[in-house]
Amino acid sequence: MVCLSAVVAGCAAPTGREAPSSRAGRSAAPVEAGAGSASAGSTADRGAPRPPAVPLALPGLARSEEESSSEAVARRETAGRAALETAHRWGVDRLPLEAPQRPVSKPELKPVQGVKLQDGRPPVVYRVPTDEKIVFLTVDDGAEKDPEFSRMAAELGVPLSTFVADYLAREDYGYFRDLAAQGDAVNNHTINHRNLKVLGYDQQRDEICRQQDRLEEQIGTRPRLFRPPYGEYNDDTLRAAGSCGIEAVPLWNEEAFPDHMEYRYDDQRLHSGDIILTHFRGTDLWPGTMPDLLRKVVNEVTSQGFALARLDDYL
Ligand SMILES: [Zn+2]
């Protein structure tokens, strides 16, 4: 375990089981050798393929064997140290597993568990059909605009898909522009965050389509994804969303909080393609900060053997 109180105070209290000397000793070896796909702390634009993980076996000997192997060892040591420092800085048990490269084309949606298809309507998706060991983190509403959270997600290489309501975001759309600039997606969560099921078609269309226009104006791209507040929708919702360019309506199978996860299924586990919901919330609304929340998600997801991928690349 790595110190879990790193974010605010700096991680200065290693446990007795893991003295600083043991950490320093491990840093000379490839990081997290048990999981060959651990990322080397990529901060690259998640719109582009992420760089490959630090190889655990030496690559083929291209030039003289001596030169190539010594350079490779040095590179691995440097990358390993950087990865450990990044994990240590944010207090996660280990770096997130590296997601596979984004798919060339989005997977075809079929009427399987977790996908609801209806002619002429955007599909409703709780879980993306995939065999990859990936899940997706989605963050809703927009009240808490914590720059530490954005930085932590970028440094850990965690891609976010956000669903933003105008009434919460309008005081500072710059925060969401910054998220978009680091490769995260900013999607539609209506203007006023009302329960759409109690509204007529025209009011629903106003709530959804006006937020399409607003996000296009504020962020620079028109969202393709829309999530109804509270997950409440009816056929008018889907029809209205489709009429202003929405291509899919992702809901969720798990909800994450700073101190626990809630699972939809009895096995209380993640499944490939699951969509995880969480919120931009501050300590007035739940027991922790946004970095605490992300630490909880990364540790849960990684310990179950999953990588976090970008939902907008798959829907
Ligand atoms: Zn919401």
Image (cartoon, rainbow, N blue to C red):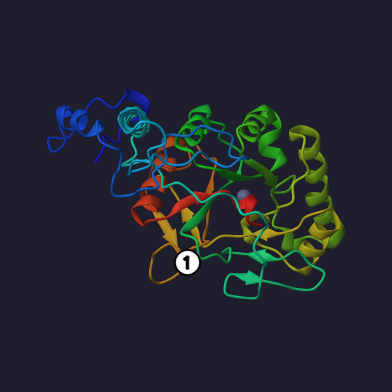
Does the closest atom of ligand 1 sit within 8 Å of the Cβ of label 1?
no
Q: Is residue 131 above or below residue 18?
A: below
The percent coordinates of residue 20 (x first, y second) are 18, 27
Q: Residue furthest front?
A: 64
Q: Is residue 105 left or right of residue 5?
A: right
Q: How many marks?
A: 1
- Left or right, residue 46 beside residue 158: right
Q: Nearer the viewer, residue 60 or 194?
A: 60
Query: Which is nearer the eye, 276 or 158?
Result: 158
Residue 97: x and y in percent read 41, 47
Q: Which corner quadrant holds the N terminus? A: top left
Quadrant hosting residue 217: top right
Which quadrant: the C terminus? Answer: bottom right
Compared to residue 97, the image places residue 11 above or below, namely above
SS at mark 1 in the image: loop
Image vertical order of residue 39 relative to residue 111, above or below: above
Q: Which residue is mark 1?
A: 264
Q: Residue at x 64, y 50 (%)?
A: 312
Image coordinates for residue 258, horizontal then vertical, percent:
41, 44
Q: Residues within 10 Å of mark 1 (few under 14, many from 20)?
A: few
Any part of residue 283 in sight: no
Q: Nearer the viewer, residue 205 or 64?
A: 64
- Residue in the image at 60% along x and 75% along y: 112
Q: Residue at x 33, y 49 (%)?
A: 35
> Where is residue 203 drawn, in percent x and y?
83, 55
The reply to whether residue 251 is in sight is: yes
Whether residue 108 sits left or right of residue 126 in the image: it is: right
Hey, what amino acid is under mark 1? Arg
